Amino acid sequence: MHEQTTRQAALQQLERTESYLAADPANARLLAAAVDHALAAGLAQRAAEHAEAAVARYPDDDVLAARLGNVLLAQGRHDQAGALFDALLERHADPALAYGAAYACYCQGLPAQALARLQPYADGAALAPQSVLLLVRVLHLNGDPERALAVALAQRARCGDDPSLLAAASL
């Protein structure tokens, strides 16, 4: 029920944002917000429309390009998302971009490549909780359960007692 309420709220925010975009279609912040709200509402196609419009209007905006990468992940277009996130990582050392690239690799069954994308952040300290979870999973898949457990334990206070993280750590 909480997820349904969250999606409904995101849909309302999306509709409000789209009404503002109708008056100001070149507003980069509104375009980015529309992508985020559409993804949160579970509307990947609508997110794609906004992301593609944003990137077409602002081709040099890497923040908007990263949002397109998130849309590609949501659509299951992992190879395209991975290529986009890898290109962005060449220009920006950023843990969120590393997560996108690593997650694309993980979804393609490439745990060694996923780990390579997360390697600069391997202590987990700069990673968001979802990224720590992915790091722990790919460490296990790459045959390093001791290091996976060490990362999970080191980040437990920051990530809380996330059941998914604890389950991944215990594999």
Image (spheres, helix red, strand yellow):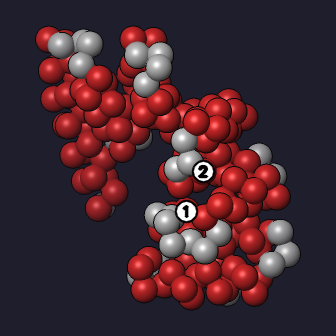
* Picture quadrant where residue 131 is located: bottom right
Could you tell which of marks 1 and 2 lies nearer the N-terminus?
2
Q: Circle 2 sits on which residue?
A: 98
Residue 134: give x, y in percent of width and height: 62, 64
Mark 1 closeness class: few <14, some 14–19, many ≥20 residues within 10 Å: many
Residue at the disc numbered 1? 131
Along the viewing direction, whichever of 90 and 112 lies nearer the viewer: 90
User: Where does residue 120 sit, x and y in percent of width and height?
Assistant: 65, 61
Q: Residue at x 35, y 38 (%)?
A: 36
Quarter of the figure with the C terminus: bottom right
Q: Secondary structure at mark 1?
A: helix
Q: Amino acid at mark 1?
A: Ser
Residue 99 showing in the rendered view: yes
On screen, residue 119 versus residue 26, left or right, reads: right
Image height of 161 relative to 122, above or below? below
Residue farthest along the right direction in this orientation: 143
In the rendered image, the vertical position of residue 83 relative to residue 152, given as above or below: above
